[in-house]
Amino acid sequence: MPSGHSLFERPHLRMPRSRPFAQVDVFSAQPYKGNPVAVILDGEGLSDEEMQAVARWTNLSETTFVLPATTEAADYQLRIFTPGGELPFAGHPTLGSAHAWLENGGTPRDPATIVQEVKAGLVEIRQGDGILSFAAPPTTRTGELEDTYLEQVIAAFGISRDKVLSHQWVDNGPGWAVLRLATAEEVLDLDPDLSMIPDAMVGAIGAYPEGSEHAFEMRTFAPGVGVVEDPVCGSMNASVGQWLTRTGEVTGSYRVSQGTKLGRAGDITITPDETGTVWVGGATTTLFRGTALI
């Protein structure tokens, strides 16, 4: 053996530690039909590089790490990583991590509200009607897309300009933009060439006929963080819900279907309250539970 330290004696390496782990299915009452999030329930002592390596390895749209809060206003801190980088906020990881935290013995200071600390700020989560819901955080960018960018997205989507009813920046951290098409069928028919918009974080939404179980079909494409299509996206549904309720396009509570094209059965409930806050809710179910060696 060459002289020097053995593998685990090298000063820059350390033995892995066993950490509680859960993989939670979010936004579907049907097992394995929602969007999975990997939750490392003890992220203390991990570097940013180690968290990123784990997220790249799980190869899920998001992997999260639960840490002690840095403020007394929060119950815990959450770091959220995609295979390509860290996000300041994301929706289905928020609900899935809160679910796993509660199952792992977490107790919120306020029994009615869980407060999660993320890089984007504090996010409130409430329990009710058998689901968890989070309060949509403020958007950091709104307004219509610039003409040049809109044309790039339209070209990548393979549609004509007259198919777009409206469009908007709906960024609450990840950088989202959205195009509204006339029908859910048009959204499901999209076959985008994401090589034309490799840095994009963009979605499409279209309406189902009146009286349908769901009001809209949503699809979300995130090549900008290494995710081709997100099966069910809470953050985009949150900011799109804020946009549609703000403009009066929708009133009251409504449901969104997502993941249909990927063989999933995402079901998201959007509920504006009397204060104007938009709540984004759905089912959460732990399907894998154990330990991770990190």
Image: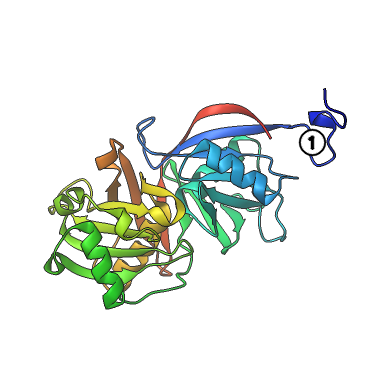
Q: Can residue 128 be seen by looking at this rendering?
A: yes
Q: Residue furthest right?
A: 4
Q: Quadrant of the N terminus?
A: top right
Res 177 quadrant in image: bottom left
Q: Residues within 10 Å of mark 1 (few under 14, many from 20)?
A: few
Q: Quadrant of the C terminus?
A: top right
In the image, residue 83 lies at what x, y percent? 51, 46
In front: 94, or 246? 94
Which residue is located at x 28 percent, y 75 percent? 148
In front: 113, or 1? 1
In front: 92, or 274? 92
Q: Residue furthest front?
A: 2
Q: Can residue 280 be seen by looking at this rendering?
A: no
In the image, residue 180 lies at what x, y percent? 23, 63
In front: 168, or 27? 168
**Can you say whether 170 is above or below 285 in the image?**
below
Left or right: where does residue 117 sit relative to residue 189? right
Query: Which residue type does callout 1 highlight?
Result: Arg
Which residue is located at x 71 percent, y 45 percent? 46
Q: Residue furthest top?
A: 1
In the image, residue 97 lies at what x, y percent? 55, 44
**Can you say whether 243 is above or below 44 in the image?**
below
**Can you say whether 166 is above or below 135 in the image?**
below
In the image, residue 182 lies at what x, y percent? 14, 61
Q: Which residue is mark 1?
A: 14
Which residue is located at x 32 percent, y 44 percent? 267
Left or right: where does residue 258 sit relative to residue 165? right
